[in-house]
């Protein structure tokens, strides 16, 4: 008898609940018992585990966050305790939903003999083996909603606004929100602009009559207050700054993320049913794929075409 454990780990992402629901329902369809593991890897070690049925998961697909709760930094937790806890509760296959750290930990577990499948869920979309991770599409739409409101007031007052979005070492959120939301100047980890370049581009736009400009930057590239002050002093203009922060993680998942999460959840269960493990599911060219967990990485994406599109659309 297969007893499947399921957990979410790392940062929460809209669509995690849809993935949980899909995994549990697919497991039930294939006559597997399911154990829910709360609070991520630490919760597994601590034994925060209970039976989970599809009946308990009605009406969670549309909700943000994760009903299993989560915790961060699984790389600091020794695998021995996690493996012992799996044995104690009779769990013989495992699904881990999360970002880079979570999938790396899944790889460590599979190297110790645990049958595990990983599902990518991270708003940054920094896992390059898959075109999209669960949560990215919803987060883009959240950012776009904020940008639309910011642009309304920027247009009214003819002011330049800096908007900082999440992303850590990946600029996808900044790039795609600029493409869809009309960001004129973009600075990302892949293409970081120095302050003089930002000021030069803004000066050109202002001199051409465009006074309500939007500068979108990835978090941690600058101290936003210093960037704001530098632009004001160099160009003698008033600049506003908005750090969107944690609100980008929340909200009900988009239809795209719900469907993606459901497809990935079912694929994960069916891989385990067929005796496969040590893999992460993903999507490429609109088809669900799987790769070995040791191939999961956060290498830089090739976004040359999208940066060119953003440059053209900024005119």
Image (cartoon, rainbow, N blue to C red):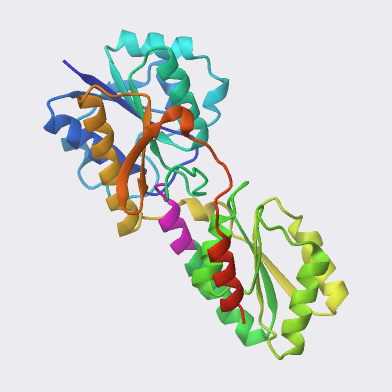
Left or right: 180, with 259 as reference point: right
Residue 127 vs 253, above or below: the answer is: above
14 shown above or below 243: above
Q: Look at the picture and state if 159 lies above or below 280.
A: below
Residue 61 lies, in percent from the top left, at: 27, 48
- Based on the picture, tell me whether residue 241 belongs to the magenta stretch: no
Tell how many labels: 0
Q: Nearer the viewer, residue 204 or 181?
A: 204
Instruction: Give the image quarter of residue 32.
Output: top left
Residue range of the region highlighted in magenta in the rendering: 132-142
User: Can residue 96 be spotted in the picture?
Assistant: no
Viewer-proximal residue among 299 and 26: 299
Work out whether residue 259 or residue 66 is closer to the camera in this orientation and state it: 259
Residue 264 on image: x %, y %: 30, 41
Q: What secondary structure prevails in the magenta region?
A: helix
**Which image quadrant is residue 50 in?**
top left
Residue 137 on the magenta segment? yes
- Report the quarter where the N terminus lies: top left
Please tell me which residue is depicted at 32% across the width and 24% down the height of the picture: 277
Q: Position of residue 208 (x, y in %)?
A: 72, 90
């Amino acid at each position: 008898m297969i007893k499947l454990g399921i957990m979410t780990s790392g940062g929460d992402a809209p669509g995690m609940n849809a993935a949980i629901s899909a995994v549990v329902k697919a497991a039930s369809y294939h006559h597997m018992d399911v154990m829910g593991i709360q609070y991520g890897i630490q919760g597994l070690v601590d034994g925060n585990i209970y039976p989970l049925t599809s009946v308990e998961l009605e009406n969670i697909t549309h909700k943000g966050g994760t009903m299993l709760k989560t915790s961060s930094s699984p790389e600091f937790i020794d695998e021995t305790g996690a493996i012992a806890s799996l044995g104690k509760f009779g769990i013989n296959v495992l699904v881990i939903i999360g970002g880079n750290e979570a999938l790396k930990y899944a790889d460590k577990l599979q190297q110790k003999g645990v049958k595990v499948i990983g599902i990518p869920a991270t708003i940054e979309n920094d896992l390059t083996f898959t075109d999209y991770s669960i949560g990215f599409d919803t987060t883009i739409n959240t950012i776009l909603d904020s940008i639309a409101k910011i642009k309304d007031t920027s247009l009214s007052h003819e002011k330049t606004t800096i908007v900082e979005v999440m992303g850590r070492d990946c600029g996808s959120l900044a790039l795609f929100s600029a493409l869809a939301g009309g960001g004129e100047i973009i600075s990302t980890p892949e293409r970081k602009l120095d302050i003089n370049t930002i000021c030069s581009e803004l000066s050109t736009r202002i001199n051409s009559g465009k006074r309500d400009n939007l500068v979108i930057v990835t978090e941690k590239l600058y101290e936003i207050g210093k960037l704001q002050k530098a632009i004001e002093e160099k160009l003698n203009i008033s600049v506003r700054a908005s750090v969107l922060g944690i609100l980008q993680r929340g909200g009900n998942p988009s239809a795209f993320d719900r469907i993606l999460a459901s497809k990935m959840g079912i694929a994960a269960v069916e891989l385990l049913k067929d005796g496969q493990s040590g893999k992460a599911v993903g999507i490429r060219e609109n088809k669900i794929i799987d790769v070995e967990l040791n191939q999961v990485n956060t290498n830089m994406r090739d976004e040359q075409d999208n940066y060119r599109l953003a440059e053209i659309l900024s005119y």
